[in-house]
Image: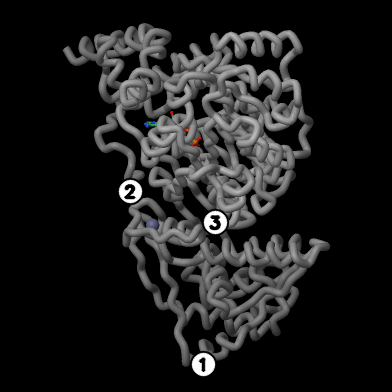
């Protein structure tokens, strides 16, 4: 088993839970494995598929993804193929012939094919070692991606009693888990529930004051790296993408309003490392296997914690560090409320509201983000400090803002609670704009009392007062601010207002290896270009040639021989044979150039 792990995949050890799943399957026991994205689920069945006699059939819901899955398996030398409606009848016949002659270890099919009686008939003539159900939550009506086609998989154990069944998913509440077990009728299965923690992801929530500038700054701090920017509306997606293109970033939009062709082209360009950034609505993501996504930015509030977890989960599948940034301001809430209030279905509206309040709480608390996320999934985070979220990495400072809060509250009272946040800020900062002058607000006692702070400071304090339920916003298009009971106690100095400010530490990602010298990153870029060139020649995505982790490992270890190359994580025998020579030559040339320069 370990030998195959090394030779085929080039990995020296298993990730958590992989070994127990592989062992169970080799011992002919059914399995249900719930592992997070990036947990390494494919290896759990690909390895037994190679070791067990017969063919392993993988039921996978996304036809669009099958080619990449098969290319990925083949790149490690696994005899893999797929059967789906995108192929011509001739191509399908060819695969069938191969299947019947025992030439396929791993066969990907869509669930609708499994329903076809002639396909079932063919299967009965093939020794089937295993049936793997990928994205198994699709079988449950309680899950979020229910696929009626999946219900036909209930026939598996009766039609093929000798065949092992292994179900995999990255999302399953306990209810969905029970449903999967029952619908598939698994026989005394090994059930694995991995931790949902994604240790290589850094969570960072920032106050959103100028999203365009903030996005640009984030992209500049991740030059050339692949990332997704999520926005709520199609319009904001198009605007943000256009803004980034105008600034010279290779960014492309993705939303349901684009034509199929455009969407497909943009997604393809992203997968093939031709566009580094995709700006998208939540329509984007399902079926993205790209492992080298280094950052995800939410420029608007996600719909729910679950959505947030899934969307950020697309980063860092390869286990290398990745950053998830959420830009958040209380000012975004009315827009979302407006949208929710217009939902016709009452139950749906209530669910959306509950989800919104959980997300808002997540973004506003000063509790470790990781702890809060895991909490949501019913998992207790065992450490005090996760060392990779804005809360845990920052030093917290409690600032007494009672005096400043009084200035704001008094400006709201003196203008009879008839104005919005921007105008109140204009009053305390002493603006002389037309609206201020028209209303004679420059004669108010509070006009200009807060000049010593900038507008951003005041907007942030208003946010804080909204979050601490001192004030509230009216609903509708032009929300105005009004006081809640707590405000009068603050005005009378009976209660104080503290805000917890997280001071940003200028600290690198804790998972970035300190020995990663700039020279290595120069080599890394060269390795990356070579990877891209090879991928284009072979018509496969770059991450299938080698993962970012593998390239980093090469840049750090500088292998000079085939043997040394085999010790690099992700280099198995087949990849060594296919690509080893080219990469060794590149490293060789790089090293001698550098030695010369040093000498
Ligand atoms: P999932 O399907 O669970 O999201 P994948 O099967 O796509 O995860 O694996 C994610 C990444 O982790 C891939 O790049 C894969 O090569 C890598 N990987 C899987 N198992 C290991 C391992 N034991 N050691 C190192 N990397 C691994
Ligand atoms: Zn933390």
Mark 1 or mark 3, which is nearer the start of the sequence? Answer: 3
Q: For mark 2, give the secondary structure.
A: loop
- Dot 1 alpha-carbon crowd within 10 angstroms: few under 14, some 14 to 19, many 20 or more: few
Which image quarter: residue 475?
A: bottom right
Q: Are marks 3 and 1 in contact (CB under 8 Å)?
A: no
Please give the residue where the numbered disc 2 appears in the rendered image.
Answer: 507
Please give the residue where the numbered disc 3 appears in the rendered image.
Answer: 174
Number of marks in picture = 3
Image position, residue 2 (x, y; %): 31, 26
Can you tell which of label 1 and label 2 is closer to the viewer?
A: 2
- Dot 2 alpha-carbon crowd within 10 angstroms: few under 14, some 14 to 19, many 20 or more: few
Image position, residue 77 (x, y; %): 46, 14
Question: Can residue 140 be seen from the camera position used here?
Answer: yes
* Image mark for residue 492: 1
Q: In the image, is residue 482 above or below residue 313?
A: below
Mark 2 or mark 1, which is nearer the start of the sequence? Answer: 1
Which image quarter: residue 145?
A: top right
Image position, residue 299 (x, y; %): 59, 50
Left or right: 265 with respect to 197?
A: right
CB at mark 2 closer than 8 A to ligand 2? no
Q: Mark 3 and mark 1: span between their CA atoms? A: 50 Å
Q: For mark 3, give the secondary structure.
A: helix
Please give the name of the residue rendered at 36% of the width and 68% of the height, measured from the top-left corner.
Answer: 397
Quadrant where the C terminus lies? top left
Left or right: 499 with respect to 328?
A: left
Q: Mark 1 and mark 2: span between their CA atoms? A: 41 Å
Q: In the image, is residue 169 above or below residue 572?
A: below
Ligand 2: quadrant of the figure = bottom left
Please give the name of the residue rendered at 61% of the width and 14% of the height, measured from the top-left corner.
Answer: 99
The residue lying toward the viewer, choosing from 362 and 43, is 43
């Amino acid at each position: 088993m370990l030998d195959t792990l090394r030779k085929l995949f080039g990995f020296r050890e298993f990730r958590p839970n992989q070994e127990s799943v592989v062992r169970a399957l080799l011992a002919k026991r059914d399995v249900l494995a719930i592992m997070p994205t990036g947990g390494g689920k494919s290896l759990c069945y690909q390895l037994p598929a190679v070791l067990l006699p017969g063919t392993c059939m993988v039921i996978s819901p996304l036809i669009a993804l099958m080619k990449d899955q098969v290319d990925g398996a083949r790149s490690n030398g696994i005899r893999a193929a797929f059967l789906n409606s995108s192929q011509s009848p001739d191509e399908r016949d060819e695969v069938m012939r191969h299947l019947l002659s025992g030439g396929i270890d791993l066969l990907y099919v869509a669930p609708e094919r499994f329903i076809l009686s002639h396909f079932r008939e063919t299967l009965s003539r093939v020794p089937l070692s295993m049936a793997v159900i990928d994205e198994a939550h699709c079988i449950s009506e309680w899950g979020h991606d229910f696929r009626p086609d999946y219900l036909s998989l209930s026939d598996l154990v009766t039609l093929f009693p000798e065949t092992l069944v292994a179900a995999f998913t990255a999302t399953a509440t306990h209810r969905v888990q029970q449903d999967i077990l029952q619908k598939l009728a698994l026989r005394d299965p090994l059930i694995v529930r991995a931790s949902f923690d994604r240790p290589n992801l850094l969570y960072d929530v920032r106050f959103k004051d100028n999203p365009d500038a903030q996005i640009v700054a984030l992209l500049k701090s991740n030059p050339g790296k692949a990332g997704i920017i999520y926005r709520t509306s199609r319009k904001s997606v198009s605007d943000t993408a256009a803004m980034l293109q105008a600034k010279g970033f290779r960014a492309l939009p993705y939303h349901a309003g684009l034509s199929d062709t455009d969407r497909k082209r943009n997604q393809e360009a992203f997968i093939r490392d031709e566009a580094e950034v995709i700006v998208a609505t939540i329509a984007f993501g399902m079926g993205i296997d790209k492992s080298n996504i280094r950052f995800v930015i939410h420029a608007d509030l996600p719909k729910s914690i679950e959505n947030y977890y899934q969307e950020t989960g697309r980063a860092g599948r390869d286990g290398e560090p990745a950053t998830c940034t959420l830009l958040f301001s209380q000012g975004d809430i009315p827009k979302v409320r407006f949208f929710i209030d217009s939902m016709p279905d009452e139950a749906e509206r209530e669910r959306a509201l509950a989800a919104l309040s959980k997300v808002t709480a997540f973004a506003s608390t000063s509790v470790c983000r990781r702890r809060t996320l895991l909490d949501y999934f019913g998992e207790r985070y065992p450490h005090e400090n996760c060392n990779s979220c804005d809360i845990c990495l920052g030093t917290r400072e409690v600032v007494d803002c009672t005096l400043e809060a009084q200035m704001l509250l008094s400006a709201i009272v003196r203008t009879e609670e008839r104005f919005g946040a921007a105008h109140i800020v204009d009053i305390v900062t002493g603006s002389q704009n037309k609206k201020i002058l028209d209303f004679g607000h420059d004669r108010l006692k509070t006009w200009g009392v807060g000049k010593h702070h900038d507008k951003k400071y005041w907007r942030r304090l208003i946010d804080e007062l909204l979050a601490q339920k001192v004030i509230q916003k009216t609903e509708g298009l032009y929300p105005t601010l009004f006081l809640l009971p707590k405000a009068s106690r603050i005005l009378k100095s009976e209660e104080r207002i503290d805000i917890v400010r997280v001071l940003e530490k200028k600290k690198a990602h804790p998972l970035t290896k300190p020995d990663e010298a700039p020279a290595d990153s120069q080599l890394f870029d060269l390795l990356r270009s070579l990877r891209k060139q090879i991928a284009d020649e072979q018509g496969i995505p770059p991450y299938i040639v080698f993962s970012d982790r593998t390239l980093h490992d090469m840049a750090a270890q500088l292998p000079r021989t085939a043997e040394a190359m085999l010790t690099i994580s992700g280099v198995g025998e087949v990849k060594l044979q296919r690509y080893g020579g080219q990469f060794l030559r590149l490293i060789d040339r790089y090293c001698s150039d550098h030695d010369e320069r040093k000498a």
